[in-house]
Image (cartoon, grey):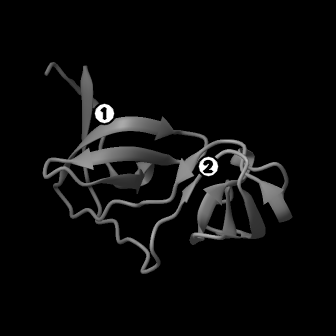
Amino acid sequence: MIRRVIAVSAHQIPAREPMRLVVGELVEAGERSDEWPAFVFVVGSHGSGWVPARYLSGPSGQVQVQVPYDTTELLTAVGDALEVWAEDLPSGWLWCRSLDGREGWVPLESVSSHQELTE
């Protein structure tokens, strides 16, 4: 069963390149997001981005990645149909695939209720 959602608001993606963190990687954890309090901004050897704080060994300073994480976000427009491949409900985000094959995180609040499809 694949679950599908519809974008009810557009989601813009950040200008910076996404980063993919691996377990054991050291990053510098800095500020926590006001808009998304579960996230902390990290800088690593391959870039920077927002990561759920619970995926790191500590709240700030040099910390170790404890859960692999990809910061890729998915650009969406109102009405886009998206397949849900993973959920991070504590953070408020879904990993989705668009019908043209692009993948990334979208805010849960930007999509409609889940629909189950048999495919």
Mark 2: which amino acid? Answer: Val
Q: Is residue 112 left or right of residue 88?
A: left
Placement of the C terminus among the 4 image quadrants: top left
Question: Viewed as shown, does residue 33 lie left or right of 117?
Answer: right
Which amino acid is tagged 1?
Answer: His
Q: Quadrant of residue 5?
A: top left
Q: Secondary structure at mark 2?
A: loop
Gap between marks 1 and 2, in whole Å? Answer: 30 Å
* Disc number placed over residue 40 in the picture, else none: none
Residue at 70% of width from left, 46% of height from top?
A: 55
Q: Position of residue 51 (x, y in %)?
A: 62, 58
Residue depicted at 35% across the width and 71% down the height: 12
What residue do we see at 35% from left, 36% from top?
85
x and y, in percent, of residue 7 in the image: 26, 53
Using residue 119 as the reference point, say whether residue 51 is left or right of it.
right
N-term mark: 1 or 2? 2
Q: Is residue 33 visible?
A: no
Count neighbours of disc 2 (C-alpha within 10 A) and say few if under 14, some if 14 to 19, many if 20 or more. Answer: some
Foreground label between 1 and 2:
2
- Look at the picture and state if 90 lies above or below 51: above
Q: Which mark is residue 114?
A: 1
Residue highlighted by disc 2: 22
The x, y position of residue 79, in whole percent, is: 16, 55
Is residue 116 at all visible to an observer of this figure? yes
